[in-house]
Amino acid sequence: MIYLYSGEGAGKTTSALGIALRALGHGQKVLVIQFLKWNRTTGEYLFKHPNYQIEQFSSTEWIGVATLTEKDAKECRNGLATAYLRCKSQDVKLLILDEINYAVSVEMLEENDVIDCLQRLKSECPDLNIVITGRGATRKLKKIADFVNIIKEVKSSGMVCDEGIQW
């Protein structure tokens, strides 16, 4: 199955990591590939478990889309290739492609390359579940996913964000 989490609200990565926790509880191998993330002090990066691997693919601490370079695009392509090769060789049961939707939306990855990789993994690794996260999921990515969840921000730091709801 392919699960897609997108939208402007917070919680996309957190939702994916909840699925990872369940998979780990069942003794399954989990691989997390993070695109355009470099912070190595997050809980998911510091977490250690024998069936859990995480790797980040970003060239630097970029600030804003305008600062992304071809080096970042190359890192993203390396991340996609790494995900494919590890799933094929390491009996991974859950693959999380964190922020891959965003990497496609800011043109650090080609949409067709991502779709091709997802379809190949789905056919070559029938027991693999895949979670893709990030803002800006394209129509085509939504179409190939088996489950699509759009995270909508309703409240942020006490500010009303939706239809005048008062908390």
Image (cartoon, rainbow, N blue to C red):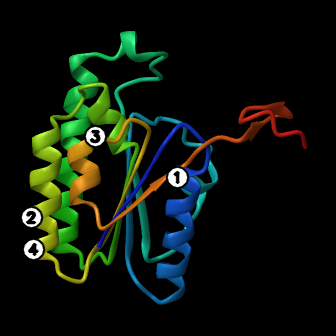
Secondary structure state at the residue bearing disc 3: loop
**Mark 3 is on which residue type?**
Thr
Mark toward the viewer: 2 or 3: 3
Residue 54 in the image: above or below residue 138? below
In the rendered structure, are the residues bearing label 2 and label 4 in contact, judged by CB atoms less than 8 Å apart?
A: yes
Q: Marks 3 and 2: in contact by CB < 8 Å?
A: no
Residue 110 spot, x, y in % from top left: 15, 35
- Residue at the right extreme? 167
The quarter of the rendered structure image containing the C terminus is top right
Give x and y (percent) for residue 32. 40, 58
In terms of depth relative to the viewer, which is nearer, 124 or 91?
124
Q: Is residue 90 left or right of residue 31?
A: left
Give the residue type that dot 2 points to: Arg
Circle nearer the N terminus (3, 4): 4
Disc 3 to disc 1, C-alpha distance: 18 Å
For marks 4 and 1, give the CA distance: 25 Å
Give x and y (percent) for residue 82: 21, 53
Discs 2, 1 touching: Cβ within 8 Å: no
Seen at 16% across and 71% down, the residue is 122
The residue under label 1 is 13
Q: Residues within 10 Å of mark 4 (few under 14, many from 20)?
A: few
Disc nearer the start of the sequence (3/1): 1
The residue under label 2 is: 120
The residue where tag 4 is placed is 123
Q: Is residue 36 left or right of residue 63?
A: left
Mark 2: few/some/many CA within 10 Å (<14, 14-19, 20+): few
Quadrant where the N terminus sits is bottom left
Q: Residue furthest top?
A: 66
Report the amino acid beneath label 4. Ser
Left or right: 11, with 112 as reference point: right
The secondary structure type at the circle numbered 2 is helix
Residue drawn at the location 45% of the way across and 88% of the way down: 27
